[in-house]
Amino acid sequence: MAAIVPILSAFLGFLVTFLSLPRFIRYLCRIGLVVKDQNKLGTPLVPLSGGVVVIVGFIVAVMFFIFNSTFLPHITGFSFSGRDLTLLFAAITSILLVSLIGFIDDLLIRGDKSASYGLSQLQKPLLTLFAAIPLMVVNAGFTTINLPFIGDLRFGPFYPLVLVPVIVVVAANMVNMLAGFNGLEAGLGLVSIGMLGLYAFANDRFLAALIALSVFAPLAAFFYFNKYPAKILPGDSLTYLLGATLATLAILGNIERAVFIVSIPFFFEALLKARSKFKAASYGFFKDGRIHTHSDKVCSIPHFFTRTGRFTERQITYSIIFIEIVFSSLIWVI
């Protein structure tokens, strides 16, 4: 019976997201929160900021579980301690704040609807630094972490006061870089968060597993509408949500090593983007049924595909998702 409650919580989050998205799509079209889908013939306008509905689904899922654990512990087979609730609500608050920053970024759309010009490269890390405060003030996380090829490192109070904000800022902004293709951001999130959720559960990190499941379910619903050809685009509201989720999984689950391994494609993307001083776009343009790039210089992982002009958008998306599957699988063996 106890196993049913988290499944019901996840299903409720999935259902709320799945049923809300069609209306939300129509609403975004009506208010003009749309951008050009750059990888399509004619660059059609597509609604932006689908991450908002995923956030709602996440909140519904996690609150439903908390409600049952608080008032019906005999059914859930689990009740939260005061410390658990403090950590959980701090994590939820940080995730919401980071997602809000992403949503604000989505609202700043260029006049020609070509893209969201967003916040500046300085504003983004500063604002996400502020979003880490809830996790810092409750002393979230474990002061000893395990890193690949290094082993255990003890940080003491340095962990909540310095490493926690660094993890939140880096995670939120790195996920935002590898984007621009239908289904890519959501697909990468499903793989990384799904695998980390299983890893946390297998290692008895219940809070981390709960957060992962509560994000995974509504994200799966969103993927249905975002996969090629996308009816709605994720926007920074989703990529920032996914980054904040990775950060909280690392911190609450003490699985920094696993999160680091899962995030290797994002780190590699950041290194490539640095070649253009973070100005290069990941997406290309549509020609003869394939996606081409504007330059032969590789400044993004998708450029390995678009510079050849031989791949469709769907092929590029699933190729990159497969790369993420490979790295996510390594957490079980490294």
Image (spheres, rainbow, N blue to C red):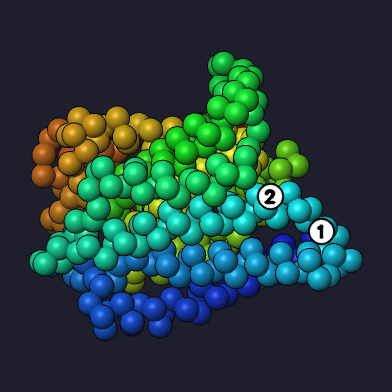
- What residue would you read off at disc 1? 79
Q: Residue most toward the right?
A: 74
- Circle 2 residues within 10 Å: few <14, some 14–19, many ≥20: many
**Could one spot residue 107 in this view of the protein?**
yes
Identify the image quadrant of residue 331: top right
Q: Position of residue 95 (x, y in %)?
A: 50, 54
Q: Who's the residue at 39% across and 53% down the image?
A: 239
Give the Cα distance between marks 1 and 2: 12 Å
**Which residue is painted at 26% across and 83% down in the image?**
30
Going by the numbered disc 1, the residue's amino acid type is Ser
Crowdedness near tag 1: few (<14), some (14–19) or many (≥20) residues, C-alpha within 10 Å: some
Would you identify the image quadrant in which residue 72 lies? bottom right
Is 95 placed above or below 310 here?
below
- Left or right: where does residue 2 sit relative to residue 183? right
Up-down relation of residue 319 to residue 23 (above or below): above
Pick whichever, 45 or 212, lies toward us.
212
According to the image, label 2 marks what residue?
207
Whichever of callouts 1 and 2 sits on the residue coming sooner in the sequence is 1
| Secondary structure of the residue carrying numbered label 1 | loop
